């Protein structure tokens, strides 16, 4: 979810891009320029593009709380050191919990229903998405970190 949020606000919080040729072996990669617990963004890999949290004993994907188990490969790409503010990480956890709790309603194909004298119509935003999408619900709180483009 963190990567999806960062892409949505057009802000990856890149501290330093590190282009080069990298090798992932045994599901791990050594990155001496990254600190323990720091987020990284892998770009240019055939199998492992994404945002991860770096640990000396492995990397975990923020969309999967278990260790990611990177796929072994050698690739020419960029590994960006990220400096995502703790407030954004906390907000991403809150958004993730909201999405888990409301996924059935948000993904419902029904825009309106009525029965037994009761009816409702699901609101929609200007872009046609359900107004109760995480993007709409959390827009105001995400806006301080929004950029025009990445």
Image (spheres, rainbow, N blue to C red):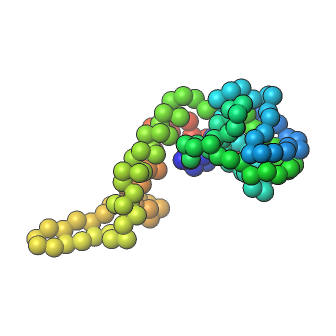
Q: Residue furthest top?
A: 35
Q: Is residue 118 visible?
A: yes
Q: Could you say where residue 55 lies in the image, as x and y percent from the top left?
A: 68, 32
Q: How many numbered marks have been drawn onto this rendered protein structure?
A: 0
Farthest residue, direction left? 117
Residue 106 falls left or right of residue 79: left
Looking at the image, residue 14 sits to the left or right of residue 133; the answer is right
Q: Residue at position x 89%, y 44% from top?
A: 21
Give the residue displayed 57% in from the left and 29% down from the top: 85
* Relative vertical location of residue 41 with respect to residue 102 in this rendering, above or below: above
Q: Where is residue 148 in the image (x, y as percent from the top left)?
A: 62, 44
Q: Quadrant of the C terminus?
A: top right
Q: Position of residue 56 (x, y in %)?
A: 72, 31
- Residue at left 64%, top 36%? 53
Residue in the foreground of this view, choosing between 38 and 117: 38
For the residue pair 139 and 52, the one nearer the viewer reads as: 52
**Which residue is pictured at 88% across the width and 41% down the height?**
20
Q: Position of residue 16 (x, y in %)?
A: 77, 32
Q: Can residue 140 be seen in this view?
A: no
Q: Is residue 42 left or right of residue 10?
A: right
Vertical arrangement, residue 1 with respect to residue 16, above or below = below
> Residue 120's quadrant in the figure?
bottom left
């Amino acid at each position: 979810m963190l990567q999806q949020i960062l892409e949505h606000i057009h802000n990856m919080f890149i501290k330093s891009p590190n282009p080069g040729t990298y090798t992932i072996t045994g599901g791990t990669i050594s990155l001496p320029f990254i600190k323990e617990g720091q987020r990284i963004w892998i770009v240019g890999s055939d199998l492992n593009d994404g945002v991860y949290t770096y640990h000396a004993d492995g990397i975990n994907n923020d969309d999967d709380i278990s260790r990611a188990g990177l796929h072994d490969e050698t690739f020419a790409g960029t590994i960006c050191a990220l400096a995502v503010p703790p407030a954004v990480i906390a907000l991403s956890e809150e958004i993730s919990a909201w999405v888990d709790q409301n996924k059935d309603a948000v993904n419902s194909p029904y825009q309106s229903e009525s029965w037994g004298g009761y009816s409702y119509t699901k609101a929609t935003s200007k872009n046609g998405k359900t107004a109760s999408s995480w993007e709409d619900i959390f827009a105001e709180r995400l806006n301080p970190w929004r950029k025009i483009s990445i």
